[in-house]
Structures are given as C-alpha cells and as structure tokens.
Amino acid sequence: MSNDCQSCGACCAHFRVSFYWGETDSALGGTVPTLLTIPIHSIYVAMRGTDQHPSHCVALIGKVGEQVSCGIYEQRSSTCKEVIAGDEQCNKARRAYNLGPIINPPQEEAEILC
Ligand code: SF4
Ligand code: SF4
C-alpha cells in the first residue's frame, strides 16, 4: 500500500470487490484465501464484507481514513491491484468518506520525481 493508502482504505470499504474464482487458493496458482470470499456468480467471487451495504472488506485492518492495512496484501486479487491512488475510482471512494481527492502530478513531473 502506498503512503496515501495506509491512511485511507476507502476503496476497500466502498466497492464490491469481485473477481474470477480462479484467483482464489481453491484454484491452482490462485492466492486469495477462499475462506475470505463469497460466491456471487457461477465463476465470480467477492471479498467477504464487500457484497453488503455498508461495504467493508473482511481483510481490511484498521480504521478508514486513519490507519489501515490489508491483511492479505501479497495475496490480494487483481481487482484490488487495479485501483491506484489518485485515479477515478480512488477519489470516488474517498469522496464517500469525506476525504479529499488525491491529485497525482502530471506524468512528466512524476517521471522527474521518480
Ligand atoms: S481509495 Fe485511493 S488512497 Fe484510499 S486506499 Fe484506495 S487507492 Fe489508496
Ligand atoms: S483484500 Fe485487501 S486490498 Fe483487497 S479490498 Fe480487501 S483489504 Fe482492500
């Protein structure tokens, strides 16, 4: 998790986090613990806690907007990896928690900073 994410966690407690069941450890090469998922479709599962309202992933540790971590960070799904701090989905989730938007620097500037 980036520094921004460690004090946020909004996307893990706003969206339904669903993905192909083959990413669970029930499948060869899968990593996400099956026990932490719930079937939502014949071939899709969701992280437990994110298929309800209010949503809150069972693997999220800590308090949204303060200090958080992902309990299965190395095993998390591709869906979890898709949200990038400062992108549209990120800032949508942050808005839901009254957290200000993250504004990424323009690409050229980002390259210089790296
Ligand atoms: S909403 Fe954005 S800043 Fe917050 S945890 Fe998700 S990606 Fe990170
Ligand atoms: S598995 Fe981790 S990164 Fe994915 S939604 Fe849950 S807490 Fe967030």
Image: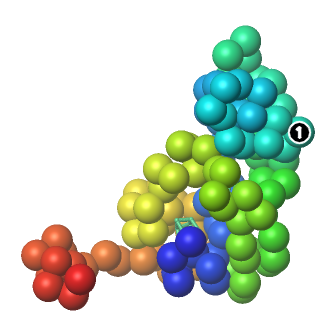
Image: 114 above or below 60: below
For mark 1, give the secondary structure.
helix
Q: In this orientation, which residue lies closer to the viewer: 59 or 12?
A: 59
Question: Ligand 1 sits in which quadrant?
Answer: bottom right
Using residue 96 as the reference point, say whether residue 110 is left or right of it. left
> Could you tell me residue 10's position as x and y percent?
65, 66
Image: 98 above or below 54: below
Please, which residue is most extreme toward the left here?
108
Residue 13 lies in quadrant: bottom right
**How dense is the environment of label 1, judged by Cα within 10 Å: few (below 14), some, or many (20 and up)?**
few
Image: 34 above or below 26: below
Please, which residue is most extreme toward the front here?
28
Q: Is residue 54 visible?
A: no
Question: Where, quadrant-wise, is the N terminus in this rendering?
Answer: bottom right
> Could you tell me residue 108's position as x and y percent?
10, 76
Q: Is residue 73 visible?
A: yes
Residue at left 80%, top 58%?
59
> Could you tell me residue 77's position as x and y percent?
61, 44
Please, which residue is most extreme toward the top here?
42
Q: Which residue is mark 1?
A: 35
